[in-house]
Image: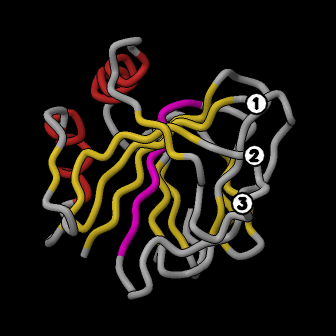
Amino acid sequence: MTNKNYTIIDDFLPEEEHKKILEVMSDTGFDWHLADKITIEQDDKDIFFYLCHVFYNQTSLFQSNLFELIFPLLKKIDPKALVRAKANLYLNQGLGVKEHASHTDYPFPHKGALYSLNTCDGYTKIGEEKIPSVANRIIFFDPSEHHCSTSCSDTKTRMNININYF
């Protein structure tokens, strides 16, 4: 499905590649890190937080020892230059589906891919469009444009991989 602001592709990876990524990231030994704010635009009184895992960040030249896990995604996306690749884990905080603060990933035009690892009632909002989280779905869009994430209420977590690139 293509909209002027984004493109959605379901069943993006072969099922076995999707399952491998999901299995590794769902393991209790996966290296998640607490982020006490979902966006820098978030109000200090806001209680929302999430867990993340940075696979790659160009600004810090950081690379996770699990970077190879996302090679199937990167191979299919075929970026010319990678800015950042990170996984997001939004926990069901028992508050229903709540939209997080609208934000941009970086202040310059670039490409973005948001890959959903599981299906839940959470979504990504681009403009006024709510795009449901569906396992093995990818959304291509310009993350320098305002968008927002949400929590979930029908599963324990909402998991995705966010890739910023040129």
Q: Are marks 2 and 1 in contact (CB under 8 Å)?
A: yes
Residue nearest the viewer, comparing 66 with 123: 66
Of marks 3 and 1, the one in the foreground: 3
State the SS at label 1.
loop
Q: Amino acid at mark 2?
A: Ile
Residue position for label 2? 47
Residue 156 drawn at (x, y percent): 67, 21
165 relative to 4, above or below? above
Identified by mark 3, the residue type is Asp
Q: Residue at 60%, 37% (x, y): give it.
A: 90
Residue 21 in percent (x, y) is at 32, 27
Q: Which residues are magenta?
A: 111-118
Reading the image, the residue beneath label 1 is 93
Numbered disc 3: secondary structure: loop
Q: Residue furthest right?
A: 95
Q: CA distance from mark 3 to mark 1?
A: 17 Å
Judging by the rendered image, the residue that carries numbered circle 3 is: 44
Distance Cα–Cα, label 2 vs label 1: 10 Å
Badge 1 local density, few (<14 within 10 Å), some, or many (20+)?
some
